[in-house]
Amino acid sequence: MLNSALWILFMGFFAGQLARRWGAPPLIGMILIGIAIGPQFADLIGPEVLGAADDLRLVAVMIILMKAGLGLDREKLAQQGTVALRLGFLPALAEVVVVAIAAMLFFNFDFMTGLLLGCVVGAESPAVIVPGMLRLKSLGWGVTKGIPDAILTGSALSDVLLLLVFALLLNFLGQDGAETLMLPGGLTLSPLQLLPFQVVLEVALGLAAGFLAAQLLVLLLVKQNWTRTVVQDVIIAASVALFLVTFARVFPYYSGYLAVMAMGFFLIEFDAPLARFLRGGFDVLWTVAEIVLFVLLGASIQLQILGNVLLPGLLLLAMGLIVGRGLGWYLSTLGSNWTWKEKLFLLPGNMAKATMQAAIGALPLAAGIEGGEIILAIAALSILTTAPIGAWATQVFAPRLLEKGEVDPTKVAIAGRPIFLAAVDASPLATPVLLKAADLARRSSGEVVVLYVDNVGDQSTVVELRQKAQKFLADIRFEFLTLPGIVPEEIVRIAQSRQVTDVVIGKRRHRPGQAVWMDSVSQAVLEISPIPVIVVAEQVD
């Protein structure tokens, strides 16, 4: 098991980074390396790990749904009206029907088995869509109209619906009939007639469970102070989220996935600072979970069964996406303020299939349903085609089809490390400036650029300042720059070119008996710098 974990994490990480450097989404490299080290080729993943793949995928999906909930924006969702709700039902249902008809034509399926295949194919992948939409939110693409939020919410709702219909059809086809529910008064309801009530019940109870879980977390972590560090906060929050997902297996009357996403959403409303801490913690968890999820996804793909269904399968997937989802997307955005370009973005932004297909694609075959092998093959084909294409197309077409708006920092995690510019000179102020920059960098895991504008050419001063920087910034990644020029202008120029977070500069104080004045350099930087400036005052004895 340890060897398998080493191969998954090590090879998955570097395969993802290679894909990123070649301009492709990291998940493509992770899926490919999963195929390479899986049982069909190198066979480097142990059977005990492959046997636990479903549970590991469940943990990864829980993490990404929590991230999605912590990134939702209530105001943007309210602004969209019913668009997000319609996106949760119409595209998925339209794709299911089109896929069912295509399956009858290409594979001689009956209509009910075709619908079963449609549910497998139509389910959307939170593991692909959620990171993509959160990335767009962090960059500002489509945020003015709340397009990423609408896609995130619609994706979660559609998966709830399709999982319900899939379970109903699997039970119906496996028993060659349908059990009915007897109601008082002699009324009977078939599973198909019960479906709308089940959907409403699962959504309502899922939202209620998320609401209560968020209240519980605020009570434990904020009001009762049971934890002392952010790591402990994340452990408790992740445990509660995982319980919501796993308990749905025991109590299948609510959607565990929706409950987790709702918990993250309500946490923003109940305690925004706690939500911000958890957002950063779940970002760290996702770094590991992403690798495990997509490497195991690649390892589970059955390539040998794709040959006979490759061409008709590709045609079926294309018809489902273009005809089925195209119609659903049109109806979902009808009457909205979306432009035709923004509506067109739904094709790359909402097409990815991976996690759900890996989780349920093999169930019809295991249940002995006729055509189960074809269903599994098309599920694998949908993963190999739509997941990498959707992830890549989302990044490429967002700048072309969406408008860029102002990023709300309370709803997204800050990407990258902060950089602080410490402007020093030959005065004693160099020491407190370096100490302040070091303190800021340590608290935020940031980096420091030490700048000395030298118009004198005094090498002894340069050597002394460099030694001070090495002493006070010994455990921090820093760069020491010595440049000539006009001091205030050079400080601002370097700060802008290096995209620093804050400028740290010293200010001399007046002494008793002297006129009150501010150091001319720090005053000039304060006046001309578009970047925040932190002034460290000289201590007066």
Image: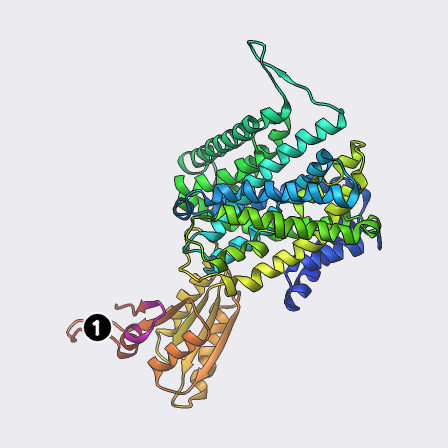
Residue at disc 1, secondary structure: loop
Q: Quadrant of the C terminus?
A: bottom left
Report the residue at 60% width, 34% height from top: 245
| Res. 1 in view | no
Mark 1, Cα crowd under 10 Å, few <14 / some 14-19 / many 20+, is some
Q: Is residue 36 above or below residue 365?
A: below
Return the residue nearer the eye: 480 or 63: 63
Q: How is the image coloured?
A: rainbow
In the displayed structure image, the side of residue 286 where residue 313 appears, left or right: right
Q: Amino acid at mark 1?
A: His
Q: Is residue 66 above or below residue 175?
A: below
Residue 434 among magenta residues: no
Residue 91 drawn at (x, y percent)? 57, 45
Q: Which residue is mark 1?
A: 510
The magenta segment? 526-535
Return the residue nearer the eye: 123 or 439: 123
| Res. 525 in view | yes
Residue 531 among magenta residues: yes
Residue 26 drawn at (x, y percent)? 65, 59
Report the residue at 41% width, 60% height from top: 405
Q: Is residue 199 above or below residue 285?
A: above
Return the residue nearer the eye: 247 or 536: 247
Which of the 4 quarters of the picture holds residue 244?
top right
